[in-house]
Structure formats: C-alpha cells, structure tokens
Image (cartoon, grey):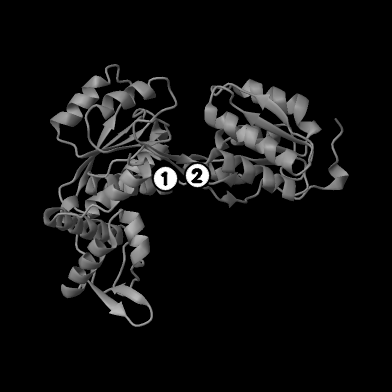
Amino acid sequence: MISENTMQQNTRKKRLTAPEVMQLQVLCRERLLADLLAQDANPGAPIAGERILCQRYDIPLSVLRSTLAELKNDGTIVSAPRSGMRLAVKPRIPKSLINANFAFIGYIQENNPRSRTTRPAVICAGLERILNEQGGQIQFFNVWGVKNFQSIADEIIKRKVDAILYIGNNHTSSGEELRILSEIGIPMISIETETVLCDTIYFDNVQIGQTAAAHILDLGHRDVCVLGFPEHNWSNIRVQSICSEFLKRGAKEPHIYEFSFHLKAADINEFIRSKATLYSACIAVNDYLGCKVLSAARGYGILVPEDLSIMGADDLLDNRHFNLTTVQLSDMELGRTAYTLLKEKFLNPQISRKSESHLLTCPLVVRNTTGQYQKSNQKVS
C-alpha cells in the first residue's frame, strides 16, 4: 500500500505540461510587475531573490528562472554584479490588472459629516487611487441601512466584479453577508471580520493590549485601571492582553471597568468623579473612550498626565487633536495589505488552500497624555 506521504511526494514531482508552464510564466510575470508597481519601484530597485520569489508565488524554481530570463531579454530587469537583480525600467501595468473591476463593501453613514474619516471611507479612497494607477477600478457598495443584502450580491454579479474586499460593521449579520458573497465564487478578502469562508486580515488585538500595558508599566505606573466595552470581542481581547502583561511582569493586576459602546457623558463623568483619584494611569481600549476620559478629567480639574496618565488605541484622524498617547492602527496599512492578498488571489486563481488569518502589528505613538509616574502622586486605594 502506498503511504499518504509518498502520494504527496509523487504529486509534487509531477512534471508540468508545456501549457501549464506557459500559464505559470505569465502569472509569475504579471504578479512580479504588479508588486513592483504597487511598491512604486524606480529603476535600480532591487529584485527579491529566487527562493523568496518561489515561496511568494508558489511556483517551481525552473518556471521562475525562465520568467526572469524573459524579463532580462526584454530589458525590464538586469543582473547586477554581487548584488542580484535590479529593475532596469519603470514597470508597465500588468495586463491582468488593466480593466480589473474590484468591489469594496462597507458601511458609511452618508449623512454624518464624520463619515469621511471612518475606516471604510479611508481605505476605499486609498485603494481606489492604487488600483486606478494599476489600470483597474474599485466600485464602492455602501450597505448602511440595506435590509436585503442579497440585492448587493446580485448587483455585484450584474456589474461583473472580479474580486471583493469586505469590511464588516461589528454586527450580527456579517457572517450571513459573507456567506452570500462567497456563493458568487470570486476571490474575496474580509477585513476585520473573521470567517472561514475567505482570508481575513485584521489588527493584532493581543499585541495592541501588550503594547499599551508595556508603555504604562515602563513609565512606572502600578495603580492602573482599564476601561473596555464587554459587548465587543476585540475589546475583550485587548483587556485580557493588558491584564496578562501586568501579571507577566509581576505587577498588580489593573482594575477593569466596563461601559456600553453607546456610553453617555454622565457615565464617564461619574467614573472620573468617584474613581479616577484611585489611579495614576488609565488605559482605554480605544481612542473614542480615551478621549471621553480625557475630556471628563479636564472638566474635574485633574491634570493630565501629572495626576493621571491616559492612553488609548486607534489613532483615528477625528481624535488626533486630543494629542492622546495611543497604539496606531493604520487604516491604509490594513487596506494595502488586504489589497495585496486579494490581488494575489485574483492573479493566481488556480491556487486552492485553506483560508488564513493575517494579523497586523501596531506601533506605539507617544504624545502628551502619558508621563513618568511620580512617587509624590502615590494613590491610596
């Protein structure tokens, strides 16, 4: 009896037919040009090594080498002594991306003036420019207030869309919407809504919590509170991660306070009035909550960061005038990464694999609302 491993080895060693080789060469060329174009690479830019490209594009070394030889022959790349390959001319738009028609599905409350700075709006605007530069177009489908999501799927089919980027709205229908979209049978990436139906990309909430906790602990704070929204999973993950970082460092576990996502000013004012003096630092799970705490603290005459250090997470444009110390969740980095994954699926449709989750790490941004712990301001529980 032939073992499963032997069968897999035989499958991998199967010789490609001439048409298969030619198809892989075209796909490899298109994807390499698309990547160079997305990087805005100029003549002289280095080309990644052969083994890296083979893994990135999931193709045999022989196919890659023949593709690179073709690119050398037509003057697109050149070999540089002791430094590998370099780009010789500005890359042309890949034929596969010319007239590519991508759909971006998101929630934007159009009658809200702040909607232009929300995550879906920022990502869509940025990706539209990128895809336009590469010869394609993005069509935006706003599903705010849409009661029959099947109508969105029908319109996508009618417009002959080639691929889908989906960003949910932290609501219960996301799973059903993704199921409807998956039945269309075209490449799809989900942003911030986890699913087994397609690849998902979202921010690493564990790392976000660790980064926030590490910053506060490094400043010497030990009497700390954490404010979160228990109805949201991303908030719970961040809170748990913050607490884990405190325990890992042997620090006293922070006190946790829970609020409704649709919190009222009175709730925060009451917290500041009755609890804020017990702590030297406060970590909010996002900037929306952090800015509410900051405004309330100033209203009660609490000096920030002298009396109370405050930090959040997001770094959304709407809140930057508060100068809040935060963990930056870059909307455009999220969008670019999602687009890169979707482009790979679009240019290489014959690759079949399990759906994966991709996490983005987020950097700390230190501003005016956190400071070194002062022993003279020691809190009394």
Task: Decide if residue 248 is on the left or right side of residue 52.
Answer: right
Query: In the image, what residue type sits under mark 1?
Result: Leu
- Position above or below: 339 against 114: below
Q: Where is residue 9 in the image (x, y as percent from the top left)?
A: 32, 49
| Residue under label 2 | 329
User: In the rendering, at what x and y percent does residue 341 appear?
Assistant: 33, 46
Secondary structure of the residue carrying tag 1 is helix
Residue at left offset 12%, top offset 57%: 18
Residue found at x 24% / y 20%? 150
Residue 261 in the image: above or below residue 73: above
**What amino acid is labelled 2 in the image?**
Leu
Quarter where residue 260 is shown? top right
325 left or right of 271 in image: left
Is 363 drawn above or below residue 39 in the view shown? above
Residue on which the image places disc 1: 334
In this view, the residue in front, 142 or 163, is 163
Residue pictured at 77% horizontal, 24% vertical:
274
- Choose between 258 and 319: the one closer to the eye: 258
Q: Which residue lies furthest to the front in this view?
A: 1
- Given contact means CB atoms under 8 Å apart, are the residues at marks 1 and 2 in contact? yes
Element type at marker 2? loop
| Label 1, label 2: how far apart the Cα atoms are | 8 Å
